[in-house]
Image (cartoon, rainbow, N blue to C red):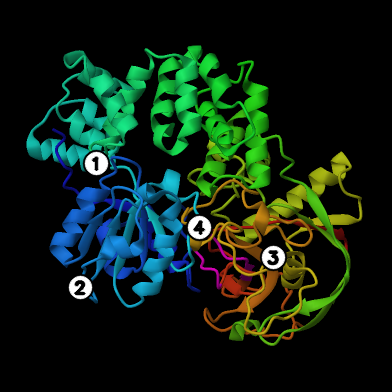
């Protein structure tokens, strides 16, 4: 019997992320502050409706039972397809509600999420599910989406110390999953991977693997993460055709077991991998993502898997988390996309500003000359080349990680961004990529908005988005998407601007050259835009610069074409980046 975990679960949302949702001041630290994550309980107590996602074995149901007991929620454990009315039949009016296991609802899941919003506008609502399933849905706007984090090493060490257990397995990478941590407490041998833990169980219980396979096949939900791993062990005894057929028939059911099987096969995985990526449907794309996590770059399947990953990213197929996994694999192998590409933005007169926020009023006409702008924010790979070439200090904690090379460069001050532009100007002139009378620089505020909105007119109370339509949660890496961090650039092709620019809503706040003023809440340089000193690059460190576009923790009200943010030029955090403009020297 697996012992239920009793420690505070953390979510992928920090106190700094919360602060960055509004306009706020940053001091100038030499390194970023260590992240302080909210606990799941804190999120429940302060946020509703809350959609809390966690992998199998992450402790969701144990947590839900604790919340129901301690805070008076009604806990509904979902076992299969059902309507919202069926799930809530007999519950009292005004009750706080937990819907646990929405991933098991199948195609009815989205309808249940919509009905919960419609019928419980004033009640506290907590919804729990698996990210691999739920993030593939078109989640209704209104939910706050957060994901449970793995158990920190120090938390597990504290448990072992309290219980006076001296074992290696609970401190392994695999045991960061709460269910597997509880399992590892009974294992007195080293076990670094989930497969090692399962092998230790099967060594004493030979029939356990087949029993786990049967449990997955029959849809029994107890100890799902353990049964998934046991099923993978049993799949070793079956053919590659059988394993692939199970996956393509029910990818949501079998994906965890197939991923474990691929890790077990290591160098002998080609037969199964070839069958997993066959076809052109979504299951083949999901198969490619799983195969990429374990495939050697020297494999004959490497070109086909790479092509599938690029197709997945460029077409915006599957969920944002699937695309992120695909892009991380591409980053490690060498992303073939041209992430330094520029696009032409024609000069002319366009509508600038909006009536949707006082700081963006009034909408008015601005005339610009031609310029080119980056299709993507500047990436870690590009900024690393600058740091290596100049020795400039960079406070980023993950900017040099290979799997993050195609994500936006962050933790950058306004001065860092301008120094990069000056360096790139010299490099590109030398290489002939720009003319000798052209410069690389940050965009002005009007240039940034022109590239984002194109010729879209003012829409009154309606917010203007780059994709020229109403809000679409699959068009931007915003709070509504629930990633709560940056992802690789270009993963939201539905959100491209009229000139083809990616990530101009959400992802990272982008520096511009334009001044805001020294008041955090109200700009000194108001609209209409004018030649009134707001482009003075020599302004002092107390004068904030304009940021545009919102970031991963911004709501749809800020992740748009017109909302104005600001930050001191020496400020930086993990939600700030930039993109470049190329224009004639003036």
- In the picture, the quarter occupied by the N terminus is top left
The residue range painted magenta reads: 546-557
Kindly report which numbered mark, 1 or 4, lies closer to the viewer in this rendering: 4
Kindly report which numbered mark, 1 or 3, lies closer to the viewer in this rendering: 3
Above or below for 156 versus 353 = above
Real-space Cα separation, disc 1 to disc 4, in angstroms = 30 Å
Mark 2, other Cα within 10 Å: few <14 / some 14–19 / many ≥20: few
Residue 317 seen in render: yes
Kindly report which numbered mark, 3 or 2, lies closer to the viewer in this rendering: 2
The label number, if any, that marks residue 92 in the structure image: 2
Under circle 4, the secondary element is: helix
- Say which residue label 1 marks: 154
Residue 346 position in % (x across, y down):
88, 64
- Say which residue label 4 marks: 481
Under circle 3, the secondary element is: loop
Real-space Cα separation, disc 2 to disc 1, in angstroms = 42 Å
Magenta highlight on residue 462: no
Above or below for 447 versus 180 = below
Residue 315 location, quadrant: top right
Which of the two labelled residues, at mark 1 and mark 3, occupies the earlier sequence position? 1
Real-space Cα separation, disc 3 to disc 2, in angstroms = 44 Å
Which of the two labelled residues, at mark 2 and mark 1, occupies the earlier sequence position? 2
- Say which residue label 3 marks: 466
Kindly report which numbered mark, 2 or 4, lies closer to the viewer in this rendering: 2
Residue 510 position in % (x across, y down):
63, 62
Asked whether 37 or 281 is in front, the reply is: 281
Real-space Cα separation, disc 2 to disc 4, in angstroms = 32 Å
Which of the two labelled residues, at mark 1 and mark 4, occupies the earlier sequence position? 1
């Amino acid at each position: 019997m697996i012992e239920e975990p009793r420690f505070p679960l953390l979510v992928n949302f920090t106190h700094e992320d919360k602060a960055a949702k509004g306009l706020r001041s940053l001091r100038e630290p030499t390194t970023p502050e260590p992240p302080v994550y909210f606990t799941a309980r804190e999120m429940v107590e302060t946020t509703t409706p809350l959609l809390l996602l966690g992998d199998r074995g992450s402790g969701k149901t144990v947590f839900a039972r604790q919340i129901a007991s301690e805070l008076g929620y009604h806990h509904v454990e979902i076992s299969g397809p059902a309507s919202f009315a069926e799930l809530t039949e007999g519950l009292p009016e005004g009750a706080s509600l937990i819907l646990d296991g929405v991933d098991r609802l199948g195609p009815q899941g989205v309808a249940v999420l919509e009905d919960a919003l419609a019928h419980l506008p004033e009640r506290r609502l907590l919804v729990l599910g698996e990210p691999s399933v739920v993030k593939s849905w078109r989640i209704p706007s209104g939910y706050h989406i957060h994901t449970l984090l793995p158990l920190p090493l120090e938390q597990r060490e504290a448990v072992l110390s309290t219980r006076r257990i001296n074992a290696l397995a609970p401190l392994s990478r695999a045991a960061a999953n709460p269910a597997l941590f509880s399992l590892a407490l009974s294992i007195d041998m080293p076990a670094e991977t989930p497969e090692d833990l399962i092998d230790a169980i099967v060594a004493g219980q030979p029939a356990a693997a087949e029993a786990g396979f049967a449990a997955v096949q029959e849809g029994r939900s107890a100890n799902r993460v353990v049964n998934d791993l046991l099923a993978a062990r049993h799949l070793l005894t079956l053919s590659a055709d059988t394993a692939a057929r199970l996956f393509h028939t029910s990818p949501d059911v079998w994906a965890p077991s197939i991923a474990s099987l691929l890790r077990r096969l290591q160098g002998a995985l080609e037969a199964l991998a070839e069958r997993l990526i066959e076809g052109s449907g979504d299951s083949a794309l999901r198969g490619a993502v799983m195969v990429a996590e374990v495939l050697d770059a020297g494999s004959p399947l490497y070109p086909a898997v790479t092509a599938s990953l690029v197709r997945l990213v460029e077409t915006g197929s599957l969920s944002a988390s699937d695309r992120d996994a695909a892009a991380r694999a591409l980053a490690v192998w060498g992303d073939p996309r041209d992430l330094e590409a520029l696009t032409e933005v024609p000069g002319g007169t366009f509508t600038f500003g909006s009536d949707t926020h006082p700081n963006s009023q009034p909408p008015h006409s601005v005339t610009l000359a031609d310029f080119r702008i980056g299709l993507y924010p500047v990436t870690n790979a590009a900024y690393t080349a600058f740091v290596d070439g100049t020795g400039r200090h960079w406070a980023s904690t993950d900017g040099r990680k290979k799997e993050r090379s195609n994500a936006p460069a962050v933790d950058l001050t306004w001065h860092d961004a301008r120094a990069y532009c000056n360096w790139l100007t010299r490099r590109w002139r030398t290489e002939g990529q720009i003319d000798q009378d052209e410069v690389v620089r940050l965009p002005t505020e009007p240039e940034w908005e022109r590239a984002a909105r194109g010729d879209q007119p003012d829409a009154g109370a309606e917010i203007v988005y780059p994709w020229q339509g109403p809000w679409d949660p699959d068009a931007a890496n915003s709070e509504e998407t629930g990633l709560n961090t940056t992802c690789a650039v270009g993963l939201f092709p539905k959100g491209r601007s009229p000139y083809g620019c990616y990530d101009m809503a959400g992802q990272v706040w982008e520096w511009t050259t334009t001044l805001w003023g020294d008041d955090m809440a109200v700009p000194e340089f108001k609209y209409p835009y004018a030649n009134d000193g707001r482009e003075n690059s020599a302004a002092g460190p107390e004068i904030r610069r304009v940021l545009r576009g919102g970031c991963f923790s911004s709501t749809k009200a800020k992740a748009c074409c017109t909302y104005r943010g600001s930050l001191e030029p020496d400020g930086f955090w993990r939600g700030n980046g930039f993109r470049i403009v190329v224009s004639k020297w003036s």
